[in-house]
Each structure stands twice: as C-alpha cells, then as structure tokens.
Amino acid sequence: MPRHIIIARDPLIASEAAQALVPAGVPSEHFFASELSAEDVFAQLSTVDMFEPRKAFIYSDFLELKLVKATAEKVNSSLARMPAELTLICTQVFEDKSKADEDKALKGEDFRRFAEGAKMDDLRGLSEARAGQRWLGERGQKRYGISLSSAQLERLWQLAAEKPALADTELRKLGLMRPDEAEEGKAWAVPDEVFRSSVSATPSAHFYGLVDAILLRSPQSQELLARWFSLEPETFRLVNELKRKLLGLNTLARGGQLQPPWLGNQLRPLARHWPSQRLGRAIQGLAKLEHDLKSGMIPAQSSKDAELAALQVYVADLSA
C-alpha cells in the first residue's frame, strides 16, 4: 500500500509530481479533498475491486478534508488498513501563505494523520527564484525545445508572478514559435525580440509594466493604471507589489542586501528616482492606503470604483 505526500507552492508542480508516482499501467482517480467525506475515503481505501485490484487515488489539497473526532477515527482506520494493491497520493499546495502558516499546517493533526508511514516530497523550493528559474530553463529545453538566457528566465519568472504554472504557459507559447528550420534535437535559442513580443502580451506583463511606470514616476502611470484595473482589478496585488519594491528600495538606501539577489539588481537603477524624503513619504502613504482599504474607510468590498480612485490619488501623489 504505497502512500505518498507531496507539498508544493504551485499546482502544476504538485500535479505533475503526483502523476509521476502513479505506477505504470495502474488506473488512477483524482479527487479534491474538499469534495470528499469520511465515508468516501473509507469506501475508496478499504475495498479492492475484483476487476481492478490495482488502483491509485490522488487527493488534492488533502488538508481540506475537515473531520470531526468520530469521522477522523474512521479515516484513521481506513489509512491503517489500506489494501496493498492501492496507492494513495496526497498533495497539498500552499499558495500565497506565509512560511509560518505553512509550518503550522504541517505540524497539525490533519497532516500527521496522512503523513504517518508515507513518503514525503517537499517541492516548495521549486517556487523560489533561483530553483524556479533553473526549473524553467530545463523545462523549456526538454519539453519545448527552446533555450532561454539567464536574463530572459529572470524576466519570465517575474512576469509570471513567480508561479511555475503561469510561466509554463509562456514557455509553451515560445515553443510554438520555434522555426521549422531549427536544428533537430537541439534547443532553439529564443531571440530577445521574439521573447519581448511574446511575453509583453500577458496580463502579468501589463501588471509589471504598471509597477515599473509607477516607480519611475512616469506620466503614463494613470493611463496604465486605468487600463490594468479594467482587466484585472486586484487592488491588494498592486498594493503588495508596491510595498515590496518600496521597502526594497529603502533597504538598498540603508546599505542592506536583498533576497533574492535579482530583486536588488532590478531596483538599483530606480534608486535615483527615490531620494530618502520622497521614499519615506511614499512608504507612509502606502501604509495609510492599505489601512484605509482594510479598515473599510475605503469601501473595498462594495465599490471597485472607490478602490481605483484611491489608487489614482496615491499614484498622483507619487508623481507630484
């Protein structure tokens, strides 16, 4: 009765790792744990089908299987008595959670219930900048027959919001641009002009183009803000990204080092636009904007127009 636990920060990473663990020739069924009951788990893991004695079950986001004491005992019994012919693969994706929240979940009873006696693969590191960019480079060559430079990988990772699943979509697009005359069996080095024309059309490119314009105090910031907000009105995504960049500039101004290193390389050319007094006002203004949004002083839940207006005022203050 093979049992596996996969921990990741990206759904693509978790899904492909789970599929790789399904034994060859064995049929598998995939479930989201939030849609399962204790009775479902008991039925699936306690019986063997005489027509399909070997089988694999994949439970995605298994920590979402919420159990009270009585049903938890039933699931514990199912796990302890799993037939040898069954394979159970449990995946848990932590998206946009703090490391402290992740560690808390991994120390809880719900996790220990499934992890006891299972082999665990912790793939969270593949969503960190250096490992993630290396993963993209290898994937581009092996799966799509393309080769990206270090600068291209860094830019793609940023445009994909450091999410492998989003970056893979862009790799696939670039792979489709591989010319027919490219040498067979050799990865095609993507020209910069092809790379720029492809990734500039992505929603994330619009987002990071807006952030860059705001940090450069560009006159086009308001136009870009209105255009992005009409497509992707994620107010707190913009607030959080501006906070990360402004605090990063503040760290550089104080002589500190940034992690990952590419963030420092990206921010250093912007530093001359942010003398200490202006930077301090920008950080204080952003803190007030975030407080007003979260406290209800700006009706974030009821009016997107109000959110946009608040962002426009803040951006205008930065450009003054």
Image (spheres, grey):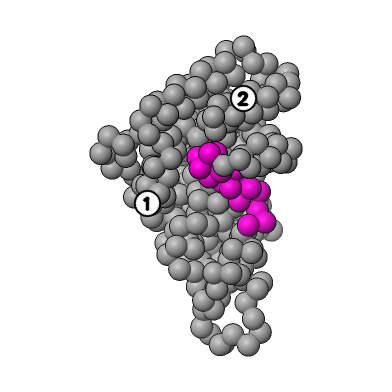
Instruction: Identify which residue, 21 or 69, lies in the foreground.
Output: 21
Residue under label 2, please give it. Answer: 313
Q: Left or right of 254: which side holds 293?
A: right
Gap in Å between the C-alphas at discs 1 and 2?
Answer: 29 Å
> Does 90 appear in magenta?
no
- Mark 2: secondary structure: helix
Q: Position of residue 184 (x, y in %)?
A: 57, 87
Q: Which residues are magenta?
A: 200-217
Q: Which residue is mark 1?
A: 265
Mark 1 secondary-structure assignment: helix
- Mark 2 residue crowding within 10 angstroms, few (<14) / some (14–19) / many (20+): few
* Image vertical order of residue 192 relative to residue 281, above or below: below
Q: Earlier in the sequence, mark 1 or mark 2?
A: 1
Given residues 224 and 200, the one toward you in this image is 224
Viewer-side residue, 219 vs 269: 219
Q: Is residue 303 visible?
A: yes
Residue 66 visible here: no
